[in-house]
Image (cartoon, helix red, strand yellow):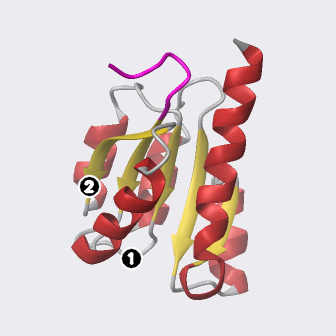
Amino acid sequence: MKSATTLRVVLVEDSPIIRERLVESLTATGRIEVVGEADSETSAVAALSSGAWDAVILDLQLKQGTGLGVLKALSDGRPDGAKVIVLTNYAIPQYRDRSLALGADYFFDKSREYDRVRNVLEEMADARSVAR
């Protein structure tokens, strides 16, 4: 059984290999639980509509649609305190600026900042532990 302080994360990534790698890395400590996965804009919006998540890791290039479309869908609301972390190979200033303008909290380059995602999520889990 998961603790009340377990951080619930949804992965939106079109690469099964990267999703698998993220799941292994994030869940290793038992403080982060992956509660949903999606590889397209439509499936991501559906997975996030439940509101039962604390953070989403969002790729910009998906099998169908884009991460920017997911960000637009989230502009109607997301759970209180929930964070959006963009993790992409397309870490150019235009995408960064657009993602942040649409509500992303973080924007990381997959090739250079991959590990920062786990660090941010662990900090969020720490904050939840202290707050409870």
Percent across and percent down for residue 60 are 46, 72
- Decide if residue 103 is in sight here: no
Q: Mark 1 vs mark 2: give the one in front.
A: 2
The secondary structure that most of the magenta stretch takes on is loop
Q: Secondary structure beneath disc 2?
A: strand
Q: Is 6 included in the stretch rendered in magenta?
A: yes
Amino acid under label 1?
Answer: Gln
Q: Secondary structure beneath disc 1?
A: loop
Looking at the rendering, the stretch of residues picked out in magenta corresponds to 1-7
Report the residue marked by disc 2: 38
Q: Quadrant of the C terminus?
A: top right
Report the residue marked by disc 1: 61
Front one among 121 and 25: 25
The residue that appears at 45% across and 32% down in the rendered structure is: 53
> Height in image: 34 above or below 22?
above
The residue that appears at 66% across and 87% down in the rendered structure is: 92
The residue that appears at 48% across and 56% down in the rendered structure is: 57
Q: For residue 51, what is the image quadrant?
A: top left
> Height in image: 119 above or below 66?
above
Amino acid under label 2?
Answer: Ala
Q: Name, please, the residue furthest toward the front.
A: 29
- Left or right position of 50 against 128: left
Percent across and percent down for residue 29 are 50, 45
Q: CA distance from mark 1 to mark 2?
A: 12 Å
